[in-house]
């Protein structure tokens, strides 16, 4: 089973079939990466079904909003992702700098919800992650673990957030509303924004010691877990 890459074949057929049954029962449809990269590829009937769905609700339809093309209302798509231009007069840099707005994303108002979807779904569709038994462990200083918990909740998976105890109260309040068992599913590690080693250490411990846990680190920082 690949730890750092993506499997191209189904690893465990039984897990895959349990996942399909769970999603069919909950009426969960997964958008493809191609659809999220170009939302006009999303079927029109699916796009119409989003009308009236709160972008921040625990609703499977919101999976089709996990992309950069949401408009200001987050109810529909726009042709070009929202951005601001920072002129040379402001930055001192000759080239214009474009800043993309992540607050148009659903569920958490930040783009890390897309990164979380990209980490969990490939494991689900290849039978590596069993939503009926496994826990998805999401380590970060805030937005990635919130995105992971949100995606887990919508997909009927058990999400666990691992973040420094010194992060903002707003982050913890959001997690307390979204985690199924906040007292168990919010793991506080020492420090604040810069204490990433403590995050890695705790995630590795959960990944190693809890057979039901799968630490879903972001691809750019993922390291092989200790054996």
Image (tube, helix red, strand yellow):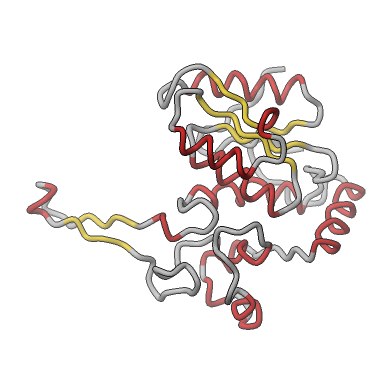
Report the residue at 55% width, 55% height from top. 107
Name the image quarter holding residue 146.
top right
Q: Nearer the viewer, residue 160 or 129?
A: 160
- The percent position of residue 25, horizontal first and vertical second, equals 86, 62
176 vs 124, left or right, is left
User: Residue farthest to the left?
Assistant: 89
Q: Quadrant location of the C terminus?
A: top right
Q: Nearer the viewer, residue 35 or 196?
A: 196
212 vs 199, left or right, is right
Report the residue at 75% width, 63% height from top. 28
Name the image quarter holding residue 218.
top right
- The percent position of residue 15, horizontal first and vertical second, equals 87, 47
78 vs 211, left or right, is left
Q: Quadrant location of the N terminus?
A: top right
Vertical order, 60 against 165 (above or below): below
Vertical order, 220 against 74 (above or below): above
Report the residue at 70% width, 38% height from top. 136
- The percent position of residue 104, horizontal first and vertical second, equals 43, 61
């Amino acid at each position: 089973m690949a730890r750092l890459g993506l499997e191209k074949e189904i690893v465990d057929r039984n897990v895959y079939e349990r996942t399909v049954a769970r999603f069919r029962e909950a009426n969960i449809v997964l958008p493809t990466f191609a659809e999220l990269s170009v939302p006009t590829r999303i079927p029109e009937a699916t796009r119409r079904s989003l009308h009236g769905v709160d972008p921040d609700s625990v609703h499977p339809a919101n999976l089709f909003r996990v992309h950069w093309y949401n408009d200001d209302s987050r109810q529909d798509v726009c042709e070009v992702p929202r951005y601001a231009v920072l002129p040379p007069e402001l930055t001192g840099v000759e080239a214009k700098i474009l800043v993309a707005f992540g607050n148009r994303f659903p569920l958490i108002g930040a783009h890390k919800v897309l990164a979380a979807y990209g980490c969990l779904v490939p494991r689900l569709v290849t039978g590596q992650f069993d939503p009926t038994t496994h826990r998805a462990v999401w380590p970060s200083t805030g937005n990635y673990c919130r995105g992971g918990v949100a995606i887990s909740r919508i997909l009927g998976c058990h999400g666990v957030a691992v973040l420094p105890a010194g992060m903002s109260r707003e982050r913890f309040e959001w997690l307390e509303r979204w985690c199924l068992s906040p007292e168990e599913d919010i793991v506080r590690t020492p420090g604040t924004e810069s204490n990433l080693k403590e995050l890695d250490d705790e995630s590795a411990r959960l990944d190693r010691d809890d057979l039901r846990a799968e630490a879903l680190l972001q691809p750019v920082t993922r390291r092989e877990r200790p054996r």
